[in-house]
Amino acid sequence: MTRARSVVVLVAVAAFLLASCAAGPNPAVDAGQDPAGFWLGLWQGIISPVTFVISLFTDDVNIYEVRNNGNWYDFGFILGVSVAFSGAGAGGGSASRGRRG
């Protein structure tokens, strides 16, 4: 196999693997009487580290609410996850140490 053909095959395999991870449509959007919205998404994003650990040991707890109102829930969830994993406490200390020295 020539080098150019190997590169083409490698790129095709990588594109196939990335495409297989793409998200599909959620048929449960706006399903039910009261789908989860922005505020519930924000809260569930903030508590996602704890929820993840609990979800490993029980089938009754999920990290992400499937029955949501769509983009606003997603925005709140991602915002909450960024708050949970931001490391804001450590960031302030490193900035003040940089100014002293």
Image (cartoon, rainbow, N blue to C red):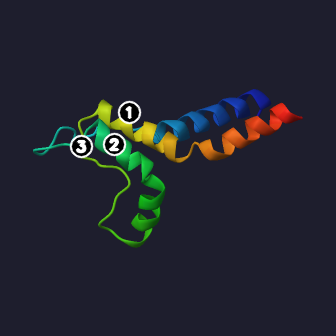
- Identify the image quadrant of residue 60: bottom left
Viewer can see residue 101: yes
Closest to the observer, 66 or 98:
98
Name the amino acid type tagged 1.
Phe
Instruction: Tell me where residue 87 appears, x and y as whole percent.
Output: 61, 45
Whether the residues at callouts 2 and 3 have beta carbons within 8 Å, the answer is yes
Instruction: Tell me where residue 17 appears, x and y as whole percent.
Output: 54, 41
Disc 1 designates what residue?
75
Name the amino acid type tagged 2.
Gly
Residue 49 against residue 36 in the figure, above or below: below
Q: Residue at the right extreme?
A: 101
Name the amino acid type tagged 3.
Ala
Report how far apart the C-alphas of labels 1 and 3 lie in the structure.
12 Å
Instruction: Tell me where residue 44 appears, x and y as whole percent.
Output: 37, 49
Closest to the observer, 64 or 80:
80
Which mark, by number, is residue 41?
2
Disc 3 designates what residue?
36
Report how far apart the C-alphas of labels 2 and 3 lie in the structure.
7 Å
Q: Looking at the image, which residue is at 59% across and 38% down? A: 13
**In which quadrant of the rendered image does the C terminus lie?**
top right
Is residue 55 rendered to the left or right of residue 35?
right
- Identify the image quadrant of residue 24: top left
- Regarding mark 3 in the picture, which secondary structure is present there? loop
Q: Residue at the front extreme?
A: 100
Q: Looking at the image, which residue is at 15% across and 42% down? A: 31
Q: Residue at the top extreme?
A: 4
